[in-house]
Each structure stands twice: as structure tokens, then as C-alpha cells.
Amino acid sequence: MKKVSTAALALAVIAPLTQLPMAASAATVRAAPSDDSGLSDVNTKRLRKNVTVGGILSHERVFQRIANKNEGTRASGTAGFDQSARYVQRRLENAGYRVRRQEFTFPFFRDLSDPALEQLTPDPQPYETATFTYSGSGEVEGALVPTNDVQVPPPAEPGSTSGCEPGDFEPASAEPEIALIQRGTCTFEQKAANAEAAGYDAVIIFNEGQEGRTDLIAGTLGRPFDVPVLGLSHAAAPTGPLRLLGC
């Protein structure tokens, strides 16, 4: 088993700016008393009579106009969402409902720019890279340190455990360092969590290397991370100082 040497490896990483978490709000409604209801709690005939295709489409057109004015989105955390929520609240209040808006937070991730990775020495060259969902943001420059079980060439069958155990990582030094991890049997979240716990300031995960597992990889970490986490193809496993820019 050949292991990647840790000698003379350094890189700089700037992860794409991301936004997380975001605040959202939901409207909870309670029907105002009606003097002329005359209906039992389970009789929905009056409601169903007033819900028409034309009425539904009229609201959908309003939502589409709101999206058109806000870069095509009404996602939580955007101006389009706020305007949509105000529209719903206003219509409910006009219909006689008392509306209370309840705020909550949830993990939200969005790339604000694309990453760009380049090797500085010995042979300057760019690398194609990708950002894992829920990656952290920031610029990191320091030594590149592979796990102690990276396998190059890879095993015949997928099964690398690189980064799956805390003991796969040398404890990071006081200087900024970036962990290099091979794709394998455990989740990306577990790999990144072990690297972060070992004190690394950024994480690069490259593909394992078997047929069908050589291309550029990216995926989800399952939860927000503080450190940048980036993906590479198997062939692009770094061998010299790197810099990630343009994000």
C-alpha cells in the first residue's frame, strides 16, 4: 500500500461564501368567530365551494410576479419570501383571520461564488474543484496533511476507510493545516467531522480511484460545518502547495 507523503505539501484554501443558518417565519392562523357560520366543525362544504381553480390561479400569479421581481426566487431568507409572507398574511386578515407569525431557524446553504483551486509549486496548474453542501467559508493557507490510510493506487474494490476514524489524522499543529482525505466507506460528514475535531482548518476530499469513482466529487455534509470542505477528482489529488481563489 502506497501512502501519500506529507513532506513539502502546503496549500491555501478560500471556500465560497455561504449563508447559514437563515431565519424563516411561518404564519399560524386561527379563525375569528363568525356569527353566521351555522356549520359544524367538520362541515367543509362552504370552504370547498369558495376554493376555485380561478382563485387558486390568481394567487399563483401574484406569487410568480413576486418571484419575477426578486431574481426568480421566493426562497426563505430572501426578499421574495418576505413579500410572499406579507401577501398571505394580508389576505388572511382580510378574510377575518387573526394571524400570528412564528419565527424559526433552519440550516441553509447557498454558494455565493464558485471556487477555483490552483497548485502553486512545483508545477503551477489549476484544479477543478467543487464545494460540499454545508461547507464552511473562509480563506486558509497552510500545510496539506493526508490521512495515514490514503491509498494510491486505490484498492481493487471500493473500501477505503480514509478519514473514517479519529486516529486516521495526525493532530494539527498550531499553524493552519488542511486535511486530505480519500473517498471511501463512511459518510462525508464523518470524514469532515473527524478532520475538524483533529484541529484542521479546511478539508479536501478526493475520489477513491476505482472505475466509476474517479471523477470530481461533491456531496452533502448533512449539517453545517465551520471549516471549508472541497472535492477533487482522483487524478487531482494534490502533490504540492495549493491556493483556492475566486470564491
Image: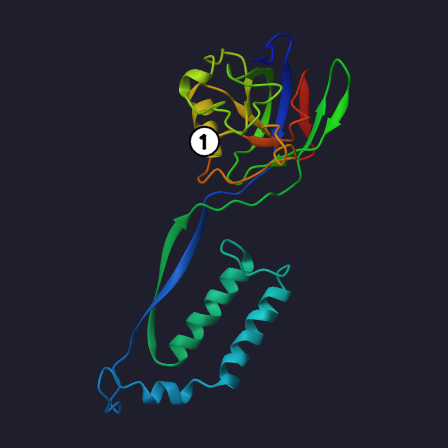
Q: Nearer the viewer, residue 181 or 24?
A: 181
Q: Which amino acid does label 1 sit on?
A: Cys
Badge 1: residue crowd in 10 Å (few <14, some 14–19, many ≥20): some
Q: As drawn, is 136 to the left or to the right of 16?
A: left
Residue 59 spot, x, y in % from top left: 52, 77
Q: As drawn, is 122 to the left or to the right of 1?
A: right
Quadrant, the N terminus: top right
Residue 128 spot, x, y in % from top left: 70, 33
Total marks in image: 1
Q: As drawn, is 233 to the left or to the right of 134?
A: right
Q: Nearer the viewer, residue 34 or 149?
A: 149
Asked where in the image residue 189 lies, by quadrant, the reply is top left
Q: Which residue lies furthest to the front in this view?
A: 156
What is the basis of the colouring in this image?
rainbow
Quadrant, the C terminus: top right
Residue 220 spot, x, y in % from top left: 51, 40
The residue depicted at 50 percent of the width and 84 percent of the height is 53
The residue depicted at 68 percent of the width and 23 percent of the height is 243
The residue beneath circle 1 is: 186
